[in-house]
Image (spheres, rainbow, N blue to C red):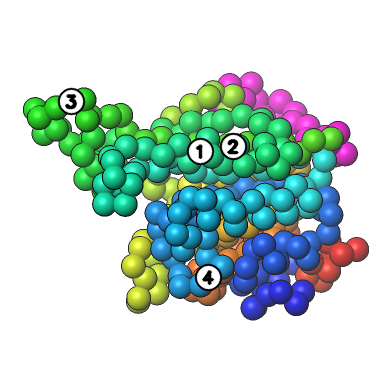
Amino acid sequence: MNTIIKQQDGKNWTAVHGDCVLGMSDLPDESVGFSVYSPPFADLFVYSDSAADMGNCADDVSFFDQYRHVIDQKMRVLKPGRLTAVHCTDLPTRKFKDGVIGLKPFSDDIMRAHIDAGFIYHSRVTVWRDPVVEMQRTKALGLLYKQLKKDSAMSRVGMADYVMVFRKPGDNPEPIKHSPNDLPVDLWQKYASPVWMDVSQTDVLNGRMARDAEDERHICPLQLPLIERAIHLWSNPGDIVLSPFMGIGSEGFVAMKTGRKFIGFELKESYWRQACKFIAESESNSSGGSLLELMAG
């Protein structure tokens, strides 16, 4: 690959330090079995000073202009009939920037962008979050108890997370089949719920290990049980799992744990270094050569 800064390979994984849009363009067509990740939340968090960092976009229009390139590459590299799961939340508006206090439907914008790119809207999972924790962390006006005494017209419910799932058109060449032993009916009923109430918000990889001294924002690793549930339900053992925004490697960590292969991209070097460590620790399978070599045939 000639569009990367650095690359590290395991027996069943490749972690790329570089721009995901350029890096994904080097992947073979229809080679990925599943994609799961959490994208930058527009301009909510600042992770680096790179112009390629989508967290540095000036506005939502600029963000989706860049993000659509990622969606187009996913459409190309996914196998027909396979899925991509995008973890996100809606975003608060800010008085100083947006002029009003409210919410932006970021999840709906992600849905529209995927549909415009040709994906089929497959499902939306609502992931419960504790509104008390949100209030303590953000001090959002709408969640403050004292706001009830002033004007509860400004009070609101807490913000959920969402897993937005999209399917590439076509017939799946390798059906994903589950036996009663692999996915018993009581577990399926939990998976099939439109609201996942049991995803612990604190069951994440230790993000503090990847923090740079000059970081302005804390990183927000994706919850491991959420990733594991998505990979279990929507991929086969041995499938390649893709994360365009790998962060500290949560998706790769779970992919190794569940007998999949993994390729991920991360622009921030400190996150990439930590991701390599976490994924290497989790690796359980072995095969010769790097994953990119295997994908190239």
Residue type indicated by callout 2: Met
Cβ atoms at labels 1 and 2 below 8 Å apart:
yes
Among numbered discs 2 and 4, the one appearing first in the sequence: 4
Residue type indicated by callout 3: Ser
Residue type indicated by callout 1: Ser
Q: Mark 4 points at which residue?
A: 51
At 24% from the left edge and 42% from the top edge, which residue is drawn?
140
Circle 2 packing at 10 Å, graded few (<14), some (14-19), many (20+), is some
Region in magenta: 171-190
Measuring from the top left, give residue 66's x and y in whole percent. 60, 57
At 44% from the left edge and 65% from the top edge, which residue is drawn?
47
For the view shown, which residue lies furthest in the front direction? 99
Q: Quadrant of the C terminus?
A: bottom right
Circle 3 packing at 10 Å, graded few (<14), some (14-19), many (20+), is some
Q: Quadrant of the N terminus?
A: bottom right
Viewed as shown, does residue 21 lie left or right of 172? Answer: left
Residue 107, labelled with which disc?
1
Query: Can you tell which quarter of the image residue 14 is in?
Result: bottom right
Viewed as shown, does residue 259 lie left or right of 224? Answer: right
> What kind of element bears circle 3?
helix
Judge depth for marks 4 and 1 and give the one in front. Answer: 4
Among numbered discs 4 and 3, the one appearing first in the sequence: 4
Residue 152, labelled with which disc?
3
Residue type indicated by callout 4: Ala
Q: Is residue 82 above or below residue 205?
A: above
Q: Name the residue under label 2.
A: 111
Among numbered discs 1 and 3, the one appearing first in the sequence: 1
Q: Nearer the viewer, residue 149 or 250?
A: 149
Viewed as shown, does residue 123 lie left or right of 134? Answer: right
Alpha-carbon span between mark 4 and mark 3? 41 Å
